[in-house]
Amino acid sequence: MIVSLSVIFLAAGVITVFTLIKYDEFAYVYDENAADEAVNDEGLRLVGATRGNVDSIPFLVAYNPAVFNYSLRFTTCTGSLITPTIILSAAHCILNVVDTQDIEKCLNLSRTSTFSNKFNGRVRCTYTADDNIKIELINPTGVAYLGVNNVNSYEDVKLGQSIEIDYIIRHKHSYRGGGSYGTYGGFDITLLHLTISAFQTPACLPGIRFKDSGIGPGYNININASLAGYGAYYRASDYCLTDALGPSRYHYCRSNTNCLTKSAPPQNSKCEEFFSRQQTVYKMPDNVYKIAIKINNTEENCYRASSGIVGSYGWCDVDTDANTLGVLKNAKSWGFCSEDCFLRNNLTDLEPDFDVLRRIDQVDILDDHTCVEFLNTALRNAAVSFRPEILCIGKLGSSITEKYTKKDTTFSHIGSDLSFFVTSVGPCSGDSGGPVYVKDIKSGRFVVLGTVSGGHGELGRCGGINNPTHYVRMKSLASWIQLVLGDEKTNICWVGNE
């Protein structure tokens, strides 16, 4: 989905309306334990995130592939500098320059003239020697911001570099956009060319032997994989995400539903009896998700009365169930309102929504087997013309269920169950094309493992359970990048080819 923001620009007595295009297919899940905002190197989240510092992530790029007025600074996507003149990003970020359905028309017209896109920008499309598509930006060109923490700040932009983008390379089997792989599939990757060399140090790419999956805290493998981007700080006001402890965890509150703070969440009579029948009032341990009580052949699930997670407050109704992979059901339930629900409350201290660098550390890159399962679900287990090459980024979680049985008036503990789940940490409007990256211990260089494509779970709406974000897997597309860059491939830094 794409969000259009209209901005009125007044100059020399003339009023001009510009449409700012924001790509809004995905958004980061809010981290309830994040620290206060500060421009430092301690970023924990992206929606509502602590800011990042470009000095510690020098290869990060904010860009817009078509800027109609350079006095209006705004970006649509994030990218990674991989040579002094090449930005690596996502194919869906360039679809406003030339949409998939217009490629053939652009190629035909470009034999004698130029093509006018839907925003009256002029471009020229030609085939490369290997049948990829080169899209020259005639008028307007794009712009990339490098070495900039906050594109909203004129002073910050002056301290960095603003460089024109003069052409784009589209993969011949490119992802076609629309938020779904459809029957085509394709690769959500693009390369953008800068007119002059950047001062910043490019990132490296992973070689064939570089471990890029099955890593992160959930796998007890001490490799810190991080995400970064210039995307949205806030969710849409009616998209309120629940936290980890209610019956509907990492789901969305019913649209336009307020968080209820003056009443306790629903509790059935059997649960009320369980919590009150102890010698002292039963307090659920912090590491326990729920109490399951078996009475005859039925089971009742009991949850705490308040979350206890810092920032979570109140509860809300939930009318969907996405706990089964690939299935979204209508179901009445409830969840605790996470801090995500209250970000916009303090109107006197609003953080800029877009165009500010933020990062999150210690994400999990799912193992290949699990990622294939999620991809197959997103593809509806159907064959596509070109199967996407992806990494799945999320958070592996676990929870404990304490099991009791009731006989007469006595509750007896009969065991515990441990279950696992995956939640999204994946990106927000403006973060598209941004990297998942690690810092190689041996070389000290950053390595971009993948670029944001999007979330393809049933919940959508910027995160949730069973919705890891799909990142295009760089290790699988290394040969394409080298082929496209030709002689410039010698400027790519590789780690893991040894």
Image (cartoon, helix red, strand yellow):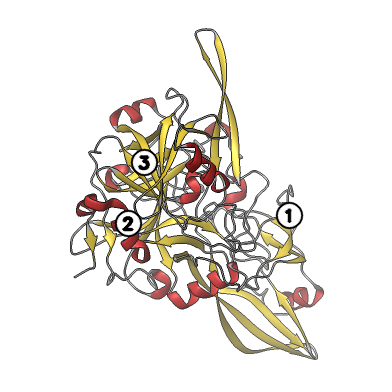
Residue at image mark 1: 254
Q: Is residue 213 shown above or below 292?
A: above
Q: Nearer the viewer, residue 49 or 180?
A: 180
Mark 1 neighbour density, 10 Å: few (under 14) some (14–19) many (20 or more):
many
The amino acid pointed to by label 2 is: Ile
Residue at image mark 2: 481
Task: State which mark lies toward you, 3 or 1.
Answer: 1
N-terminal of the two: label 3 or label 1? 3
The amino acid pointed to by label 3 is: Val
Q: Is residue 406 shown above or below 498?
A: below
| In contact (CB < 8 Å): disc 1 and disc 2 | no
Task: Name the image quarter holding the C terminus.
Answer: bottom left
Q: Is residue 419 shown above or below 211?
A: below
The amino acid pointed to by label 1 is: Arg
Picture quarter containing residue 220? Answer: bottom left
Mark 2 neighbour density, 10 Å: few (under 14) some (14–19) many (20 or more):
some
N-terminal of the two: label 2 or label 3? 3
N-terminal of the two: label 1 or label 2? 1
Q: Which mark is residue 39?
A: 3
> Taking the image as drawn, is residue 65 in sight?
no
| In contact (CB < 8 Å): disc 3 and disc 1 | no
Picture quarter containing residue 463? Answer: bottom right
Q: Position of residue 461 (x, y in %)?
A: 62, 53
Name the element at disc 3.
loop
